[in-house]
Image (cartoon, rainbow, N blue to C red):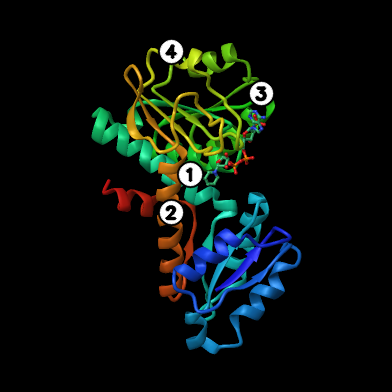
Amino acid sequence: MIFLSTDKHPSPFDIQMIYDAGADHVIYYGEVTPENCKQLILDAMFPRGPEGVKHTAMFIGGNKPELCVEIAEIAKKSMFPPFEIATVVDPQGGYTTAAALVAMVEHCLEKVCGVKPIEVKYAIIGGTGRVGRSAAYLLAKDGAKVRIVSRSRERALKRSEEINKKLSVERVEGFGPAKAPEEIFEACKDVEVVITTGPPGVQLVPKSVLEKLEKCRVVADVNAVPPTGIEGLKPSKKCKPILGNILGIGALAIGNLKNQVEMELIKMALEAPKGFFELEEAYKCARKILGI
Ligand SMILES: NC(=O)c1ccc[n+]([C@@H]2O[C@H](COP(=O)([O-])OP(=O)(O)OC[C@H]3O[C@@H](n4cnc5c(N)ncnc54)[C@H](OP(=O)(O)O)[C@@H]3O)[C@@H](O)[C@H]2O)c1
């Protein structure tokens, strides 16, 4: 598997995942950009011939999601039959994490709360980031109403408009600025699901806010580094009560599914002769693992 990363040092997380999924060799390149990727992609396509290329796979990752998307677009345009390489796209684990997060929230709503996931409203705090906006995209694509919450109104509006435009819908709204507890409360007071996708070690929702959220049924957080994103939500919680009627899903529970999804996507790419395995394939995979 050829790993093209936008990072200077391609992530050992993904490299180990690729080996554990069954690749014989991982050849990795760092600081890959839309400007320098084409030659690498072409040079990966041709040396083994039409039959050999079926046994080559590619992984596009790194901490710059926009660049990863551009590199993936260049790869799609560069490949043609029979020289196609099965390719996984997962910028800094953002797609597989968002896929696992959304699938676990939907599983909790459907199987434990008895609620249809598209009939409730979601607030995603830190929703402008890699994981948050991918989660917002998946929920909005399914038909749910989503609010992207940010410390900056401008960033919240920008990211929500991008998703609405991509899906040709008006289901995603931006909210900001929100940082102080009273602003976070305003952002969450009318939603059934609160999701936090902030940076490691930053608490975004204090208990004092949770206690006032009358409509909230489920909360989920992806930050496993203490303090976690939601006060009182243990990272290992898996759709279990955390306060009153609120059920919580913690970062380690989500991370566990995320790892299974990434492993499965890589296996699919290693086995498939061609195809792209991106956010939506990761989401299908997460739902399949959970049986929904
Ligand atoms: N559980 C897992 O398996 C797993 C896997 C991958 C990542 N993660 C975790 O997922 C989380 C999100 O990752 P990401 O890659 O999406 O991060 P990211 O792209 O950096 O996004 C985080 C967002 O949080 C907001 N933010 C940043 N600093 C903040 C602060 N000091 N206070 C409040 N908000 C702040 C930012 O939004 P605004 O600036 O617009 O407010 C930013 O867009 C991280 O905690 C990461 O460790 C978990």
Residue drawn at (42%, 68%), measured in percent from left and top?
267
| Mark 4 surroundings within 10 Å by alpha-carbon count, few (fewer than 14), some (14 through 19), many (20 or more) | few
Depth check: give the residue in front, 187 or 241. Answer: 241
Quarter-wise, where is residue 9 in the image?
A: bottom right
- Residue 144's label in the rendered image is none
On the image, numbered disc 1 is attached to which residue?
98
Instruction: Identify the secondary structure beneath mark 1.
Output: helix
Kindly identify the amino acid type of the residue bearing the numbered disc 4: Glu
On the image, numbered disc 4 is attached to which residue?
211
The quarter of the rendering in which ligand 1 is drawn is top right
Give the mark toward the camera: 3 or 1: 1
112 relative to 149 in the view: left or right: left
Give the image location of residue 144, x and y in percent.
Answer: 40, 32
Give the mark toward the camera: 4 or 3: 4
Kindly identify the amino acid type of the residue bearing the numbered disc 3: Arg
Q: How far apart are marks 4 and 2 (CA)?
A: 34 Å
Q: How far apart are marks 4 and 3 (CA)?
A: 25 Å
Which badge, 4 or 3, comes first in the chain's sequence? 3
On the image, numbered disc 3 is attached to which residue?
153
Q: Does the residue labelled 3 lie within 8 Å of ligand 1?
A: no
Instruction: Identify the secondary structure beneath mark 2.
Output: helix
Instruction: Identify the secondary structure beneath mark 3.
Output: helix
Give the image location of residue 54, x and y in percent.
Answer: 47, 80
Q: How far apart are marks 1 and 2 (CA)?
A: 9 Å
Give the mark toward the camera: 1 or 4: 4
Give the image location of residue 92, x and y in percent.
Answer: 59, 52
Give the image location of residue 177, x and y in percent.
Answer: 65, 20
| Mark 2 surroundings within 10 Å by alpha-carbon count, few (fewer than 14), some (14 through 19), many (20 or more) | many
Residue drawn at (59%, 53%), measured in percent from left and top?
91
